Image (tube, helix red, strand yellow):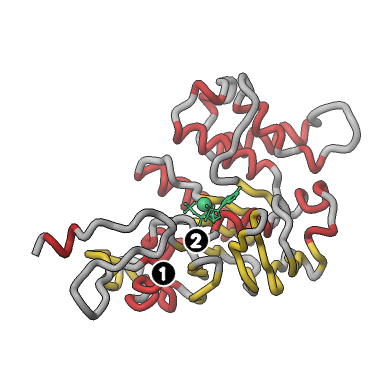
Amino acid sequence: MGSLKTSHLDIAYEDRLIVKDLNISIPQGKITALVGANGSGKSTVLKTMARILNPKSGSVLLNGKSIHKQSTREVAKQLAILPQNPTAPEGLTVYELVSYGRFPHQKGFGGLKAEDRQVVEWAIEATRMEEFSDRALEQLSGGQRQRAWIAMALAQETSILFLDEPTTFLDMAHQLEVLQLLEELNADSGRTIVMVVHDLNHAARYAHYMIAIKQGQAVASGSPEEVVTSPVLRDVFGIEADIVTDPRSGVPLCLPYELYRAATGGKVRKSNNDGPEMPPVAASAQ
Ligand SMILES: Nc1ncnc2c1ncn2[C@@H]1O[C@H](COP(=O)(O)OP(=O)(O)OP(=O)(O)O)[C@@H](O)[C@H]1O
Ligand SMILES: [Mg+2]
């Protein structure tokens, strides 16, 4: 249960094609990291694979069946997603938010059953949110709010979990806490986890499989050793980086040191994202 892949996926916003002919397979029971520059299409791909966005053409296959032909409830029992910028109604408490995660499992009316409440409480404990459980979301810090949303996704108890930048607002200890929790969920119950992360060292350490996205295309995929390499980082992020081996875990560690310069002229090359051209800071400093 839980096989997931895309087949000839094209995704567009109105007329603008963002993803073209994407064919990726998510390894079952593993942690996969999606990496790539800002604006490269990571969130677009994740949302389409979670059935939040419709593709222009092609399909997302969950257990061999097109996800866009299944009902919200059917998909939500199998796949939970923490979007990049989730929003909730004002005044909603942490407990209420996490309870929403039980929606796909509820039958008819009548609210939460004892079993649902147990799962909600487990998710709140797993994300260390017990002391905030009755607090409204807008009265939390950015990191606490992020953990509340992670708890909601956990409460869905799905075999596939998608997280779009789950560690972005967190301090170093809470980043590790979330990543270790995901690692435990994967190891203990074999959940398939797909996360978008910007920290390549976290990706290399916690993911078994990585997919590097550039302009809506998967330009490299494989183990961290295959993806976190100088040529891939030059291509995907437009940076020069040294790769060393982490003495403790043995995974590749990335030491970025400057923007990639084209062979001619010594000018700093435009980075691969959609942003404004980078000023030639590094070039003029020498
Ligand atoms: N709702 C939208 N309508 C139109 N264009 C969009 C919309 N959402 C994203 N885009 C565009 O699609 C492209 C891919 O965006 P996406 O959010 O998938 O990037 P990303 O890789 O997740 O970036 P980031 O690292 O900044 O989160 C960008 O050029 C973005 O401007
Ligand atoms: Mg994004």
Q: Is residue 262 above or below residue 198?
A: below
Quarter residue 261 falls in: bottom left
**Tag on residue 236?**
1
Q: Earlier in the sequence, mark 2 or mark 1?
A: 2
- Please name the amino acid that badge 1 sits on: Val
- The Cα–Cα distance between marks 2 and 1, rounded to whole angstroms, is 9 Å
Q: Nearest the camera: 173 or 25?
A: 25
Query: Closest to the observer: 220 or 38?
Result: 38
- In this orientation, does residue 191 appear? no
Determine whether the beta carbon of the residue marked 2 sits less than 8 angstroms from the nearest atom of ligand 1: yes
- The quadrant in which the N terminus is found is bottom right
As displayed, is residue 130 above or below residue 47? above
- Residue 40 image label: 2
Left/right of residue 145 with respect to residue 115 in the rendered view? left
Residue at (74%, 67%) from the top-left corner? 57
Q: Are marks 2 and 1 in contact (CB under 8 Å)?
A: yes
Which residue sits furthest left? 286
How far from the left and from the top, in percent, is residue 91? 61, 19
Give, as a three-letter code, the residue at label 2: Ser
- Residue 217 seen anywhere in this rendered image of the structure: yes
